[in-house]
Image: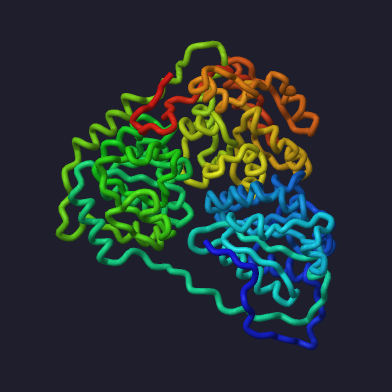
């Protein structure tokens, strides 16, 4: 991914009968011209000219209560809709508060345009009040960035920013708008050079044939699918190829839902907290067909022990991912949708190999290691609660979640029929993500039930967005799993640090139901297992925003667990 401050313009269009418009108004009108209807933002001094003209537009502005909340909401909106999200903040701390969201969008390849106000051009570089070099700060974590120097550049700049955010491997784009440029009036419109042609192609016919030959020769083939499937609009093509080849499938965290969770060929999520059937299949396969995944360390465990007997076919729109971490036998860059559709290993004169023994082994393990939800103890058992909730929620429900133990329980125990059903922070692992992402997802998909699953540690990081739920009456359903500890860190302290529970005990938490009601959010507490069914009913039937506060065992851990630096076959269990 490349970063620059400004593209060259080609020429200037001057219309003497055109009314002069400010850079701020041109910015918002240009955003409207991209089909955007919703933006998430927070006003301040440098961005004030934009807010001054905001009422003159048709844009729906959602006032979040922290700029990080704005950024996370824009990510949730983008992931739920498949469109480019938009977040707006002022200069200085407003811009730096967006940085975590920008990094989250970058690592999860989410298309979002972030717009920041900046001090006037003549003050840039002088350490002016609320000045930071946001272009320099974010350079490693954006696809592209711009500083607006002339209001006549803004329409072309905005159009290109939204194009770049969505094309190829999606990602964040930053526009920094100095206050004097926002205030300046112009009748000019600078024509920018035509957009570069995006490579829509797929692997060469030679590589397609080589991949098909590997699939014909394999005795233990396995699909390893990731988030690129959904981002490359390849869900239908993946499902058709999987069913046509009858090859088992494992998924990354971001690939969940690309194949329905209850699909007969699906073995589950792989990796550090992957299911046993999935991890064992990876370790024993002789061909790994990787589609839209990047060999992330949380998925692979110790990389040199990952799929040690397998040849690799790797499909990814970003050619830089091919061979980056694992040598591939065949690499297919370009459109995942086209590559998946082109693969037809058993058509024509091809003969499907007999892999019945392999399938029997894989599916037998899935049955053998099926989860037992009859856990001992008196506390609410979170995996069963989430399993039951996902089964009783509408088929189109979206789950957004924070980061920690609850995130892994959602991935392991909830059912997803589509990748847009599951929205979480994968690459960056951002606590505080779930609540703002949930409200963004609900605004983007108002017809769908949206459920945020959070933990008592995570929710406190952006809990101010309960005010946003109340302000706009966003009917988000929140499940707060409260074990009064930083659960995932405490688990590692227990397992790897001799039970030295340093700074992970949260027994001074507030009463979260009382706190939610202070924000005028309906809330209730579930303390025991026999209250769970009624709690789920109340959660799903409440029309407005609602929080279900669930007390769970602070000693409950996420299993299986692959220790750091170990093979995925070395799974620790309860």
Which residue reaches farthest top? 377
Please name the residue shown 39% across and 46% down the image: 225
**In the visual, does 181 lie left or right of 209?**
right
- Residue 355, by quadrant, is top left
Q: Residue at x 42, y 26 (%)?
A: 560
Give 472 or 402, whichever is nearer the viewer: 402
- Which x, y percent locates residue 63? 77, 49
Out of 485 and 342, give the one closest to the viewer.
485
Q: In the figure, 216 relative to 531: above or below?
A: below
Percent x, y of residue 369: 35, 25
Whether residue 389 sits left or right of residue 175 in the image: it is left
Residue 54's place in the image compared with 381, above or below, is below
Residue at the spot 22% in from the left edge and 37% down from the top edge: 358
**Quadrant containing the C terminus in the rendered view:** top left
Q: Is residue 334 visible?
A: yes
**Could you say which quadrant of the image residue 177 lies in?**
bottom right
**How are the colours assigned in the image?**
rainbow
Name the residue located 44 percent from the left edge and 41 percent from the top edge.
297
Say if residue 54 shows up in the picture. no
Residue 215 lies, in percent from the top left, at: 23, 51
Horizontal and vertical percent position of residue 470:
77, 39
The vertical placement of 376 against 476, above or below, is above
**Is residue 185 shown above or below 63?**
below
């Amino acid at each position: 991914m490349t970063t620059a401050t400004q593209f060259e313009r080609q020429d200037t269009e001057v219309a003497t009968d055109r009314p002069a418009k400010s850079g701020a108004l041109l910015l918002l009108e240009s955003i409207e011209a991209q089909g955007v209807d919703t933006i998430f933002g927070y006003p301040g001094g440098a961005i004030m000219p934009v807010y001054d003209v905001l009422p003159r537009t048709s844009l729906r502005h959602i006032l979040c209560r922290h700029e990080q909340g704005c950024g996370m909401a824009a990510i949730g909106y983008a992931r739920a809709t498949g469109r480019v999200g938009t977040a707006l903040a002022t200069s200085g701390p407003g811009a730096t508060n967006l940085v975590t969201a920008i990094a989250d969008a970058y690592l999860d390849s989410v298309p979002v345009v972030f717009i920041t106000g900046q001090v006037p051009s003549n003050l840039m570089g002088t350490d002016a009040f609320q000045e930071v070099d946001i272009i320099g700060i974010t350079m490693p974590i954006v696809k592209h960035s711009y500083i607006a120097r002339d209001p006549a550049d803004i329409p072309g700049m905005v159009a290109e920013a939204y194009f770049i955010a969505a094309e190829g491997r999606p990602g964040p784009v930053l526009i920094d708008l100095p206050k004097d440029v926002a205030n300046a009036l112009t009748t000019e419109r600078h024509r920018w050079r035509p957009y570069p042609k995006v490579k829509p192609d797929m692997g060469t016919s030679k590589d397609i044939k080589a991949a098909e030959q590997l699939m014909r020769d394999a005795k233990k083939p396995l699909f390893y699918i990731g988030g690129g499937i959904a981002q490359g609009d390849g869900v239908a093509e993946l499902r058709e190829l999987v069913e046509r080849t009858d090859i088992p499938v494992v998924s990354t965290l971001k690939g969940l839902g690309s194949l329905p969770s209850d699909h007969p060929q699906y073995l589950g999520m792989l990796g550090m907290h992957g299911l046993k059937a999935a991890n064992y299949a990876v370790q024993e396969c002789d061909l790994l067909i990787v589609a839209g995944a990047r060999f992330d360390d949380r998925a692979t465990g110790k990389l040199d022990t990952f799929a040690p007997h397998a040849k690799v076919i790797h499909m990814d729109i970003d050619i830089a991912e091919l061979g980056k971490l694992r040598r591939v036998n065949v690499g297919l860059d370009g459109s995942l949708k086209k590559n998946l559709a082109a693969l037809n290993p058993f058509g024509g004169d091809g003969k499907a190999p007999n892999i019945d023994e392999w399938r029997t082994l894989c599916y037998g393990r899935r049955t053998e290691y099926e989860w037992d939800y009859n856990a001992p103890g008196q506390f609410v058992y979170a995996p069963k609660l989430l399993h039951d909730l996902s089964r009783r929620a509408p088929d189109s429900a979206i789950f957004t979640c924070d980061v920690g133990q609850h995130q892994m329980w959602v991935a392991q125990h909830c059912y997803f029929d589509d990748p847009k059903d599951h929205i979480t922070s994968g690459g960056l692992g951002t606590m505080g993500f779930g609540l703002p992402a949930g409200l963004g997802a609900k605004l983007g998909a108002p017809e769908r039930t949206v459920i945020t699953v959070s933990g008592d540690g995570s929710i406190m990081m952006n809990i101010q967005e309960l005010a946003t739920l109340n302000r706009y009456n966003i009917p988000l359903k929140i499940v707060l799993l409260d074990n009064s500890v930083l659960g995932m860190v405490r688990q590692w302290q227990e397992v790897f640090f001799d039970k030295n529970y340093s700074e992970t005990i949260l027994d001074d938490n507030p009463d979260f139901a009382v706190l939610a009601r202070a924000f005028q959010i309906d809330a209730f507490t579930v303390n025991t297992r026999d209250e769970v069914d009624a709690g789920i009913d109340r959660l799903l039937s409440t029309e407005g925003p609602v929080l279900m506060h669930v007390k769970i065992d602070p000693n409950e851990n996420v299993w299986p667990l692959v220790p750091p630096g170990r093979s995925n076959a070395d799974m620790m269990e309860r």
